Amino acid sequence: MPRSLSTYLDLLRIVAAFAVFGSHATFAEFTGGIVAPQLQIGRAAVIVFFVLSGYVITYAATERERSLRSFAVSRLARVYSVALGALALTAAVDLLTVAVGFPRTVPTYQYVGWWKYLPLFLSFSSEAWTFREGVFSNAVFWSLSYEVWYYIAFAAAIYYRGWRRALLLIAILAFMRERMLIEFPIWILGSLIYRLHGRLTLRRGLARVLVVVSLAGLVAVRASGLDDRVNGAVNALLGGYPVAHLHASQFFAGDYIVGLLAGLNIFAARYAGFGLLEVPAVRRAIVYAASFTFTLYLTHRPFLNLFLMLGHDPHSPLSIGVMVVAVLVAVWLFGLVTEHRKLAWRRWFEQLIAAARDRLARRAPLLYRLATPTLGS
């Protein structure tokens, strides 16, 4: 991958993560509702993440992770290194909220029945099948649930062959059900763009124009409310089914528009040649900031809620400024012991998978042979 494109994708991740953080931080309870709902861009940023994920995961599987074992270790370390800490942080803030009687909605029934909800959350299945559960009070986990199952479906398609691939995909896609499946083409679009980069090319001038046009389009779609109108029209056309049954995917029609624009942006960025992004100091700063984006995404809500309990005044500019800085510092410190510890998590998962393979080979050799993919181990 060209260095300028790699840095650009990191920059896009930073912008998307801050867009989600900014959208939530400007809720009325945190900043008095100073930003109109029409300017909330958190949902669009999540869709950009989906396209980015499809692109980067396909690149990784094609260039670096040639075996299912390597792919699984990388994904497990990436996801759990942050998700487990974010889950524990969310639970701690929720329980503190209940303990002090702070007026904030907390799904206490999930804590009472933790023994059935925790496995659902740890397997990222809270949005799959017929389940429809928020992950404690941390609403952003819905998209991670989608993404993890997209990884699983992708791995089944890439690392298996023949009837085993067909059976696995049927089972996985059936478990995902329509809510996850209806957003899956957006993730797949990112994967297709990576494939197109190996077959097509653009002149630099045209590529730069398309980058600007796609970015302007993303802003215009949200600012004009075009996505909202499209979602409303599709919902009416389908007799209210999306709103009634699709939960987090009820805005899929508008998501497709955002996804196409994000895909165009990433496709064109490959050929735009942003020289500034190759300057060592600029690149190092972007790469370092991007290394905390997953932590920012998963932990900003509990940190915001914690700050709210400490006496935050949503109408005070000073308090708002302190809140933003405090949350970002907390995210940075949290990321140093989670997202920046992926190598340790990789080693642990490598040992765990090796032990599980050996045990399966001894105890259930037939199942071991069936589960072993055609392409590598």
Image: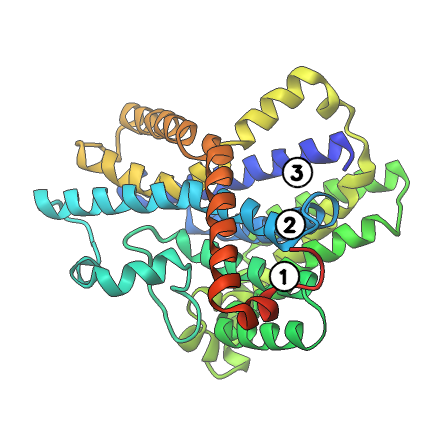
Residue matched to label 2: 57
The foreground one among 329 and 128 is: 128
How dense is the environment of label 2, judged by Cα within 10 Å: few (below 14), some, or many (20 and up)? many
Between the residue at mark 2 and the residue at mark 3, the CA separation in whole angstroms equals 13 Å
State the residue at coordinates (47%, 55%). 356
Q: Position of residue 327 (x, y in %)?
A: 34, 30
Q: Is residue 376 left or right of residue 246?
A: right
Q: Which mark is residue 9?
A: 3
Q: Mark 1 vs mark 2: which is more N-terminal?
A: 2
How dense is the environment of label 1, judged by Cα within 10 Å: few (below 14), some, or many (20 and up)? some
Q: Mark 2 vs mark 3: which is more N-terminal?
A: 3
Between the residue at mark 1 and the residue at mark 2, the CA separation in whole angstroms equals 9 Å
Query: Where, by quadrant of the figure, is residue 207 drawn?
Result: top right
Residue matched to label 1: 154
Q: Mark 3 vs mark 1: which is more N-terminal?
A: 3
Q: Position of residue 83 (x, y in %)?
A: 40, 46
Q: Height in image: 169 above or below 78?
A: below
Tell me whether the residue at label 1 lies in contact with that at label 2, contact meaning CB atoms closer than 8 angstroms. Answer: yes
Q: Is residue 77 left or right of residue 254?
A: left
Looking at the rendered structure, the secondary structure element under dot 1 is helix
State the residue at coordinates (48%, 48%). 42
Q: Is residue 26 visible?
A: no
How dense is the environment of label 3, judged by Cα within 10 Å: few (below 14), some, or many (20 and up)? many
State the residue at coordinates (41%, 64%). 125
Give the residue type that dot 2 points to.
Ile
Give the residue type that dot 3 points to.
Leu
Q: Position of residue 191 (x, y in %)?
A: 70, 55
Q: Position of residue 64 (x, y in %)?
A: 70, 43
Give the residue type that dot 1 points to.
Phe
Q: Height in image: 76 above or below 295?
A: below
The foreground one among 308 and 99 is: 99
Looking at the rendered structure, the secondary structure element under dot 2 is helix
